[in-house]
Image (cartoon, rainbow, N blue to C red):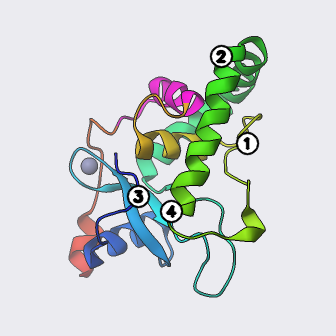
Amino acid sequence: MTTPPFDPVSDADIAIVSAQLGRPARDVVGISARCVCGGPTVVSTSPRLSDGTPFPTFYYLCHPGATAAVSELEANHVMAEFTQQLEDDEQLREAYRSAHVAYLADRESMGNVPEIDGVSAGGMPTRVKCLHALVAHSLAAGPGVNPIGDRALERASWSPEVCTCTFDEVTEES
Ligand SMILES: [Zn+2]
């Protein structure tokens, strides 16, 4: 887990993230979470892209194994379950709101972008709309910051502790 300010991003990191995403990774400010092997799992992007576009999604899940596992959770209606838990549990709602505030603070440490002021990701602070974004936040911030992301990660069939990375193609190309 890594929160801003980030260590410098290496060319090797950018090459791997680009391979993971299937497109060139641009405006990357940090690798905010890594697999146990060191491979990137969450990438942080500048809140304003170099072409001027505001970019609210500060923590993006880039690891194919992780994104597949989280997609599986979404397909199994886990979002509806978490939405219900939020409705039933006031403490959980409060913690989720705090996660939203923490997310914005992390992003603003890399620059203030008025167009996306107060806009975080994944449905925060009151809804559950994208588990990928919430899991990415949990991986970057560590346990105890984003309660819904933490719950999703616990349920996922992927873990940053068990390496499933395949970097062979990247190494061959470079
Ligand atoms: Zn790995």
Q: CA distance from mark 3 to mark 4?
A: 7 Å
Task: Point out the tag, 3 or 1, that comes first from the N-terminus.
Answer: 3
Task: Point out the tag, 2 or 1, that comes first from the N-terminus.
Answer: 2
Q: Quadrant of residue 163?
A: top left
Q: Residue at x 35, y 51 (%)?
A: 2
Residue type highlighted by circle 2: Gln
Disc 3: CA contacts within 10 A as few (<14), some (14-19) or many (>=20): some
Q: Nearer the viewer, residue 88 or 172?
A: 88
Does the beta carbon at disc 1 come under 8 Å from ligand 1? Answer: no
Q: Which residue is mark 4?
A: 109
Query: Can you tell which mark lies on residue 30?
Result: none
Q: Is residue 124 magenta?
A: no
- In the rendered view, tell whether residue 13 sits above or below residue 160: below
Horizontally, is 19 left or right of 48 in the view?
left
Does the beta carbon at disc 4 come under 8 Å from ligand 1? Answer: no
Which secondary structure type mostly characterizes the magenta part of the structure?
helix
Q: Nearer the viewer, residue 135 or 50?
A: 50
Q: CA distance from mark 4 to mark 2?
A: 27 Å
Is residue 132 visible from the viewing direction of this image?
no
Q: Which residue is mark 1?
A: 123
Residue type highlighted by circle 4: Ser
Query: Can you tell which mark lies on residue 4?
Result: 3
Which residues make up the magenta segment?
A: 147-159
Could you tell me if the residues under marks 3 and 4 are in contact, i.e. CB atoms within 8 Å?
yes
Q: Which residue is mark 2?
A: 91
Task: Point out the tag, 4 or 2, that comes first from the N-terminus.
Answer: 2
- In the rendered view, tell whether residue 151 sits above or below residue 126: above
Does the beta carbon at disc 2 come under 8 Å from ligand 1? Answer: no
- In the rendered view, tell whether residue 63 sits above or below residue 28: above
Q: In the picture, which quadrant includes the N terminus?
A: top left
Could you tell me if the residues under marks 3 and 1 are in contact, i.e. CB atoms within 8 Å?
no
